[in-house]
Image (cartoon, helix red, strand yellow):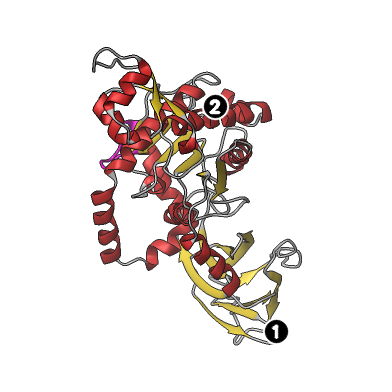
């Protein structure tokens, strides 16, 4: 009687990030596995119990910076599938299995961390170096690698579209005197959602912009929107769908980090967030308003005011953060637009214009923007002369004198020139 193996290795996918490499083994059922490393030369050996494969492994690792080759080897016993990964340098291995999450089935995920001492030292320098005179904007292209994001009717991956828009936005910011862009990812790989805020913080960012092109359960919704953090669950159906999609992204791309975090650490983090987030949330709302104003001139808006939801990438306690939905990739017309390089550039230009406008009115201390002789400010709801004087560290009298104001009454939309101290 012929015995059929309980598991089958269907495919192997590799995603290279700057300091790590992720390998995903797609399987027909949940894996039973063990692994060990060998040196001289560096190898990682994975044994899959009761498994077979017909996958041609020869060229799978040809583009990887860390993995030279993946091959089969003689197993310790019949029925075991032994895989050998030949590595170009030592790397710390972390393996975990994932249950089916559309569009994928059972998976065994291998994360190889090849961060060397030089990279760590570089990161440490970033944290301790005195901030530059530039306004630093962190740009986060959503999804990536194992996580394709939403998929349009013609098969367009959100992760590819938003990376192109993010690169165009980064170029615009870097071309602006007094501004500098840093990107959380520059290629097709996944960055854990919480780590994206950490990357922004390590770069001393003054703002984090997460760029997305999400989808809805029907093709009708369309238009761009800008989201800010809500301490409560989203109060709209689309907001709740977006929150669910973020959880889906973690399951696809970053669940290993979640598994390793203890409940006590998560409660501590949430407590700190609640204590120190109010100011960042207020600034985020103002920036979102300026960005929406720019987007409304180049594309249809889904909502004319900032929306709010509980997104992990927005939960930085000390950095204003916004999430820009550049359109609905689930809408056939907008999917076509989002694939257009011309439209991508218009979106990048609009976001850039809104960001510049905000920082001209609210320049961070010690930056080139703050050293301008005067700053232009548009009065918003709830603002008064005393509030503006405190924000810009000038006197009420100097604001009134510069603008020839006869009274202390301000109106929403009024243009003011703020004298620099």
Our reading of the magenta stretch's main secondary structure is loop
In the displayed structure image, the side of residue 243 where residue 119 appears, left or right? right
Q: Position of residue 168 (x, y in %)?
A: 63, 37
Q: Quadrant of the N terminus?
A: bottom right
Q: What range is drawn magenta here?
A: 229-237
Residue at horizontal 60 percent and vertical 35 percent from the top: 176
Q: Is residue 243 visible?
A: yes
Residue at horizontal 58 percent and vertical 40 percent from the top: 166
- As helix, strand or loop, the secondary structure at mark 1 comes to loop
Q: Which mark is residue 350?
A: 2
Number of dots carrying numbers? 2
Q: Which residue is mark 1?
A: 41
Q: Position of residue 72 (x, y in %)?
A: 69, 76
Q: Nearer the viewer, residue 400 or 110?
A: 400
- As helix, strand or loop, the secondary structure at mark 2 comes to helix
Instruction: Mark 1 or mark 2: name the one nearer the start of the chain.
Output: 1
Q: Nearer the viewer, mark 1 or mark 2?
A: 2
């Amino acid at each position: 009687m012929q015995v059929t193996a309980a598991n089958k290795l269907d495919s192997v996918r590799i995603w290279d990030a700057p300091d790590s490499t992720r390998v995903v083994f797609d399987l027909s059922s949940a894996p039973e596995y063990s692994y060990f490393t060998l040196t001289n030369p560096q190898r990682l050996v994975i044994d899959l119990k009761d498994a077979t494969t017909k996958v041609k492994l020869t060229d799978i690792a040809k583009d990887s910076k860390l993995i030279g080759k993946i091959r089969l080897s003689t197993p310790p016993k019949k029925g075991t599938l032994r895989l050998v990964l030949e590595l170009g340098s030592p790397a710390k291995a972390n393996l975990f299995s994932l249950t089916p999450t559309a569009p994928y089935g059972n998976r065994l995920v291998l994360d190889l961390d090849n961060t060397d001492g030089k990279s760590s030292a570089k990161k440490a320098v970033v944290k301790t170096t005195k901030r530059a005179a530039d306004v630093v904007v962190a740009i986060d292209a959503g999804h990536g690698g194992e996580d394709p994001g939403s998929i349009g009717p013609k098969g367009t991956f959100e992760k590819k579209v938003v990376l192109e828009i993010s690169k165009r936005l980064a170029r615009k910011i870097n071309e602006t005197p007094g501004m500098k862009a840093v990107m959380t990812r520059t290629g097709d790989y996944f960055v854990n959602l919480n780590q994206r805020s950490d990357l922004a913080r390590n770069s001393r960012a003054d703002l984090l912009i997460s760029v997305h092109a999400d989808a809805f359960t029907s093709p009708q919704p369309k238009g761009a929107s800008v989201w800010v953090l809500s301490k409560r669950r989203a109060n709209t159906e689309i907001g709740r769908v977006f929150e669910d999609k973020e959880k889906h992204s973690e399951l696809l791309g970053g669940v290993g980090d979640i598994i390793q975090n203890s409940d006590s650490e998560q409660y501590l983090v949430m407590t700190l967030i609640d204590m120190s987030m109010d100011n960042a949330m207020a600034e985020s709302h103002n920036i979102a308003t300026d960005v929406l104003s720019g987007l409304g001139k180049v594309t249809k808006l889904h909502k004319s005011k900032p929306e709010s939801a509980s997104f992990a990438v927005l939960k930085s306690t000390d950095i204003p953060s916004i999430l820009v939905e550049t359109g609905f990739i689930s809408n056939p017309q907008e999917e076509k637009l989002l694939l257009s390089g011309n439209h991508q550039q218009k979106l990048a230009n609009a976001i850039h214009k809104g960001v510049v406008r905000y920082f001209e009115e609210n320049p961070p201390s010690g930056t080139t923007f703050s050293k301008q002789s005067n700053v232009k400010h548009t009065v918003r709801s709830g603002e008064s002369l005393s509030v503006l004087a405190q924000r810009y560290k000038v006197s009420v009298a100097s604001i009134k004198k510069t603008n020839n104001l006869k009274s202390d009454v301000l109106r929403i939309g009024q243009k003011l020139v703020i004298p620099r101290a």
